[in-house]
Amino acid sequence: MDMWLEEDVQEEIDLAKLQGLEATRKVINTWNHNENLNWRLMAISNETANKLLQGNFKTFKELEKHDFDYPIKSVEILYRIMFDKNKETDINIIESIFINE
């Protein structure tokens, strides 16, 4: 992927994050047509967010599994999926946490 494009997208997302959840959602929906730019939002519960901030999850799968049992999800995390060439696998990078009020 073009390095300039990735930097432009990152800059646009960083600006949107300052404007809040809806602005961020709009930007990632604009760029998600590009397979190499895989940004996502995931709704999680307050309980899960607290555990995430405390470092209780070793993997993203643990985070997803834990949150399955909570029906009320008032927090959203922005993450991106990138391919790690060294490990030859996808990794999830959490960029931001948004609290819906």
Image: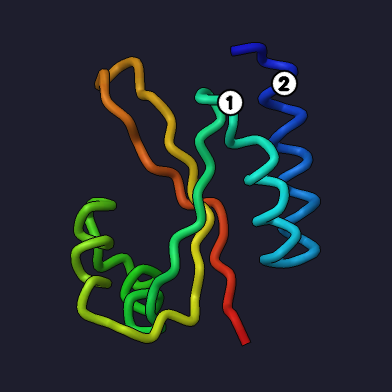
> Which residue in the rendered view is the most extreme toward the top?
2
Pointer 1 and pointer 2: residues touching (CB < 8 Å)? yes
Which quadrant, please, contains the C terminus? bottom right
The residue shown at (80%, 64%) is 19
Residue 21 shown left or right of residue 15 in the figure: left
The quadrant in which residue 91 appears is: top left
Q: Look at 34% across and 16% down and name the residue there.
A: 85
The figure's colour scheme reads rainbow
Report x, y in % for residue 31. 66, 35
* Residue at the image position 78 percent from the left and 61 percent from the top: 18
Query: Which of 55/78 is in front?
Result: 78
SS at badge 2: helix
In the rendering, which numbered label is found on residue 5?
A: 2
Tell me if 47 is positioned left or right of 5 in this view.
left
Taking depth in this image into account, of 92 and 43 the one nearest to the observer is: 43
Q: Residue furthest front?
A: 33
Residue neighbourhood size for the residue with mark 2, other residues' Cα within 10 Å, grouped as few (<14), some (14–19), many (≥20): few
Residue count near mark 1 (Cα–Cα under 10 Å), binned few <14, some 14–19, many ≥20: few
- To which residue does mark 1 refer? 34
Q: Quadrant of the N terminus?
A: top right
Q: Is residue 5 above or below residue 98?
A: above
Using the image, determine if residue 30 lies above or below residue 25: above
State which tag comes first along the sequence, 1 or 2: 2
Q: Tag 2: residue type? A: Leu
Counting labels gives 2
Amino acid under disc 1:
Asn
- Where disc 1 sits, the SS reads loop
